[in-house]
Image: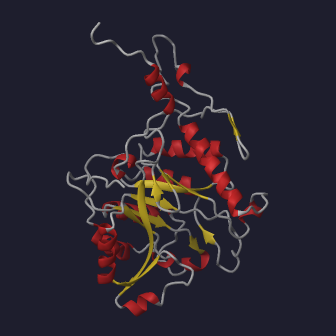
Amino acid sequence: MKHPPDLSGGRRPLVAGVTLAALRASDHAALPFNPFRLDATLAHVQALEALGVDFVVLEDSAIDTAGVAAGDAALALEAFTLAAYLAVSTRHIGLVPVVNTNYTQPFAAARLIASLDHVSHGRAGWLAVADETGNAAANHAAAPATEALRLARQREFIDVVEKLFDSWEPGAFVRDKASGDFVDLSRAHVVGHEGPAFQVKGPLNIAASPQGRPPLLLPDGTIGTAPSALALRRVTPYVGDTHDAAAARVPGDRDDAFAGTWSEWAAHVDMLRAQGIDGVWLTPPPALTRDVVYLARLLEPFGLTEPPAAATMLTARLGLPPAINRHAAHREAARPTQDVHA
């Protein structure tokens, strides 16, 4: 595990990520604003940025529309559209939209992720999920699949996306007006993937993004690429003035739930820090996902710092090493070494 540096020059103890949940229709009435209003969502994310949150996960459950009439379906703006809007009015916070690998093609996903990385100046990430809920399969003319098949498709999907990210080496777009050369085609690479679920030729039709390979977040809390990936603890916090009152709000199906008082929450965060984890990914209960006062109090034990004056790419903010393009690395390895004694 690798603890990322504190951007103020010391060390920060924990990475902090927060999910901006897709709310059920029945939750909308309890909110003081319309969650489809972009200005309200922007103000919320800017508040999280000011608190020092490292990244926000933009949930997108609109693929499942079962239960809309009863108010039970999760409703949200499309995640990449929302992320692009947020990118132009924020400077530091990472933007991590959800990609459901069951119902998306890797070429389209890679293009969206790379585009967001350009728009945000290197603050994009992506959360790969393989959930199949409600009538999501029927909405995409797909047959329901077993968990094993969905996870196999997800592994292949991630592999193809990362190959597409590397299909253009840095510096491939030379834009040399004098010579008339726009692109160095020796730095463009066909992917040529032929797998059980996907056949993708490539290359991607967009230049290498600022981060090269924007960080991948998995549902288990892993973010980044081995061996330098971070391990985040995913927690759904139910915190209140008394332990019993907090525990009474926890649904029976939440294995990642924490219930307790504010002092117990601070002690829990200290325990996680002592265990050497890299950070915490907060997935607040839907009714509290837009409550900035509640979130600010949850984040108090993290020791977060104010954002630096200069914008920072998400990989650097998390303390992850820069991605190295596989083709550029091969080119460098193949370059003849000079004999220093010659």
Q: Nearer the viewer, residue 296 or 271?
A: 271
Asked if residue 283 lies left or right of residue 193, the reply is left
Number of marks in the rendered image: 0
Asked if residue 328 lies left or right of residue 270, the reply is right
In which quadrant is the N terminus drawn?
A: bottom left
Above or below, comparing residue 286 to residue 313 in the picture: below
In which quadrant is the C terminus drawn?
A: top left
Q: Residue 285, position in %: x, y? A: 48, 76
Q: Quadrant of residue 335?
A: top left
- The residue lying furthest to the left in this view is 10
Residue in the image at 38% along x and 90% along y: 243
Q: Residue 34, position in %: x, y? A: 52, 71
Q: Quadrant of residue 103?
A: bottom right
Specify the color scheme: secondary structure
Residue in the image at 64% along x and 63% along y: 131
Q: Residue 248, position in %: x, y? A: 47, 90
Above or below, comparing residue 333 to residue 191 in the picture: above
Q: Quadrant of residue 192?
A: top right
Residue in the image at 40% along x and 52% along y: 89
Residue in the image at 51% along x and 63% along y: 220
- The residue lying furthest to the top in this view is 342
Q: Residue 286, position in %: x, y? A: 51, 75
